[in-house]
């Protein structure tokens, strides 16, 4: 996985002074790893407060993938960010992939002297 420069800077800013390979990146107030079940209560309370249909935290990945594809990110980048193979992403999120075949063909033909 490759982080953006902004994400890298943020993670460096919260990194503890002494880090070991098994040190968790995100911790609770006691410095222990965040347990998903503990976080779930807060997640569901936030969704209810915002009037958003209750769904699991894993759905944030779906939102990330659909937004990324809608905005035209390079599929290999999305594979790196999510750890999900392009074939799987395409299978589940195909409706979010903009149809750019005509635009791409026109880009390819530009400067060739041929007309479309």
Image (spheres, grey):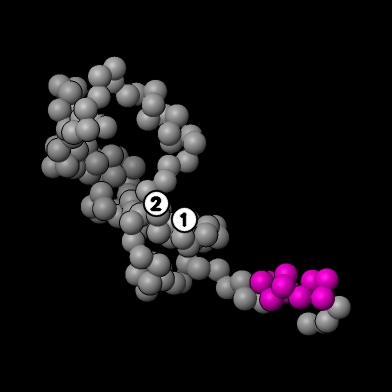
Q: Which mark is residue 77?
A: 1
Name the side, left or right, on which 22 lies relative to 8.
Answer: left
The residue most toward the right is: 113
55 or 53: which is nearer to us? Answer: 55
**In front: 27, or 43?**
27
Asked if one can make out residue 64 in the rendered structure from this viewpoint, the answer is yes
Residue 60 point in image, percent of width and height: 33, 51
| Relative vertical location of residue 46 with respect to residue 63 in this rendering, above or below | above
Q: Quadrant of residue 93?
A: bottom left
Q: Which residues are magenta?
A: 103-112
User: Residue 39's quadrant in the figure?
Assistant: top left
**Foreground pick, 54 / 21:** 21
Residue position marked by numbered label 2 in the rendering: 81
Say what secondary structure mark 2 lies in: helix
Q: Residue furthest front?
A: 21
Instruction: Label 1: state its secondary structure.
Output: helix
Q: Determine contact: label 1, label 2, CB under 8 Å.
A: yes
Front residue of this view, candidates 111 and 104: 111
Question: Which of the 4 quarters of the picture holds residue 113?
Answer: bottom right
Q: Residue furthest top?
A: 17
Going 73% across and 70% down the picture, which residue do you hit?
107
**Which label number is shown at residue 38?**
none
The C terminus - image quarter:
bottom right
- 51 in relation to 22, above or below: below
In the rendered image, the vertical position of residue 49 relative to residue 81, given as above or below: above
Q: Residues within 10 Å of mark 1 (few under 14, many from 20)?
A: some
x, y percentage for residue 75?
A: 48, 62
Q: Is residue 109 magenta?
A: yes
């Amino acid at each position: 996985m490759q982080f953006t420069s902004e994400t890298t800077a943020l993670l460096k800013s919260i990194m503890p002074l002494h880090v070991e390979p098994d040190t968790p990146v995100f911790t609770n107030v006691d410095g222990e790893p965040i347990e998903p079940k503990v976080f779930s209560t807060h997640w569901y309370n936030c969704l209810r407060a915002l009037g958003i249909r209750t769904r699991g935290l894993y759905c944030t990945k779906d939102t990330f993938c659909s937004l990324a594809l809608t905005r035209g990110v390079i599929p290999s980048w999305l594979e790196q960010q999510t750890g999900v193979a392009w074939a799987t992403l395409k299978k589940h999120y195909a409706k979010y992939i903009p149809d750019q075949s005509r635009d791409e063909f026109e880009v390819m033909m530009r400067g060739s002297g041929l007309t479309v």
